[in-house]
Amino acid sequence: MLVDISILTFFSAATVVVHALGIAHAAHAVMTVRSSRGAIAWSISLITFPWLALPLYWILGRTKFHGYAEALRSVFAQHQKLVHQAYSEITKFQVAVPEKLKSLEPLAETFTGICFTSGNAAELLIDGQQTYQAMLSAIASAKSYILLQSYIVDDDAAGNEFQAALITKAKQGIRIYFLYDEIGSNKLPHTYLNSLRQNLIQVSAFHTTKGRGNRFQLNFRNHRKILVVDGEIAFTGGLNIGNDYLGKNRRLSPWRDTHIKLQGPTVQSLQSSFLQDWYWANRQVIDVNWQVQPNREANQTAIILPTGPADKHKACQLFFVNAINQAQTRLWIATPYFVPDDSTLTALKLAAMRGVDVRIILPNRPDHLFVYLCSFSYYNEMKALDIKFYRYKHGFMHQKIILIDNDLAGVGTVNLDNRSFFLNFEVMAFMINAQFAHSLEKMLKTDLAASITVNFSEYDKKPLWFKLAVRISRLLTPLL
């Protein structure tokens, strides 16, 4: 009987403690969660079901990544001369943008410290074969150093080809820095990484859970894909490294994606993004080339926009909403995941009401079921507006593209969802150039020809279980 009383006392005390923690965390959620809907959902769950909600809140509840910005401020203070040199080299090419896009300038300066630059050249790389060929060719041409960052790296034929290419250059004395996201690349074996290290290649995970208060926060990702060679050529876009991105996944084949090859000041800007991530992971400052080699022939105006959960402002969301608001005649978006927050959704609706040709290309088959289902929840809202949805049928579409009028074109890693806007470290290249916009338009017209136009009324004919799954997925939008 005494044992029973002691056990009862223990569980009573534990229950009091857990519920007290639930109430305390509910107060924290009310004060810190970015949306009122999310704050209400978390606070009710934490008070009502604290045993389940507390561990979920520790893992999923926070949208601010602590320590990253503080680490960068520290290294900037220690290396002021180097930082000044890097930024002064880029800002030599600062250029004014067309009057209709003027509102993007102060945002760019606030978020990046650098405005739009001239002297850039951007080349579209369509799908894995073309992209990998260009990247491997650039790696083979390296004379000094290589910076390679990817969200996912797979230990398969494609991954091994990149591994072999890096090892070959390392044996030639080229300095190589390889950065990956440990959650995205959770299946990458130690043997793959050790093989790189044994050949004197600097290898590091991003260390998402590093830093005070980040230990349980598995909800953050570094979704960036960056390759910089000698500070002269750079790449970014939607493609990770693996066989899937060559269309060798039967369920998702063929894989439709877009990358971009850059020259000019944008190379140094992408390089800066990589170095900041590398410093967070390793507290190491890498010696790189800051001398800009402008492409005077193309002379495109561009900016690199790295964003993430360590930003002081909601940079990704704010820049996209502002860019959408600038659209006068055309707004074409290609994204694999359509889970917009309320501000972005409102901007899309307003664009349609202004008479803008709004087209959104989505995949017709899912790779993530909840995200796929959630996109159907917007059908009724779009039905009343002249917004056209398209479902890409020729395989799985993974590209992240935005085209505004005949002026502004963006290629990068940002999906139109809450995760990219608030939880992931992302990067986009935005070009202001009619010729590049035309090449993007041509590419998207090919994609539209391989798509079906969504008839929104067909959603009404879906079975009840499907609609219920869609609504449940919509409730999960803060996590998708």
Image: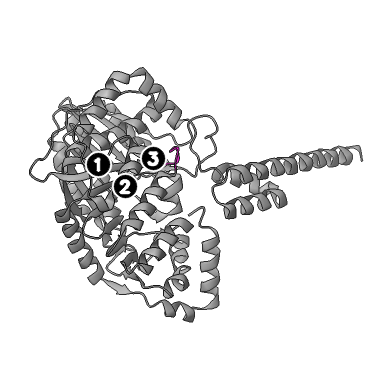
Q: Farthest right residue? A: 1
Mark 2, Cα crowd under 10 Å, few <14 / some 14-19 / many 20+, is: some
User: Disc 2 to disc 3, how far (Cα)?
Assistant: 30 Å
Q: What residue is shown at x 51% (from left), y 73% (from top)?
A: 466
Q: Quadrant of residue 392?
A: bottom left
Residue 132 is situated, as x and y percent measured from the top left of the image, at 20, 48
Could one spot residue 148 in this view of the protein?
yes
Residue 473 is situated, as x and y percent measured from the top left of the image, at 52, 62
- Which comes before the other along the chain, label 3 or label 1? 1
Contact between labelled residues 1 and 2, with CB atoms less than 8 Å apart: yes
Kindly identify which residue carries mark 1: 116
The span shown in magenta is 308-313
User: Disc 3 to disc 1, how far (Cα)?
Assistant: 29 Å
Give the residue type at disc 1.
Phe
For the N terminus, which image quadrant? top right
User: Disc 2 to disc 1, how far (Cα)?
Assistant: 9 Å
Is 246 part of what is drawn in magenta? no
Kindly identify which residue carries mark 3: 181
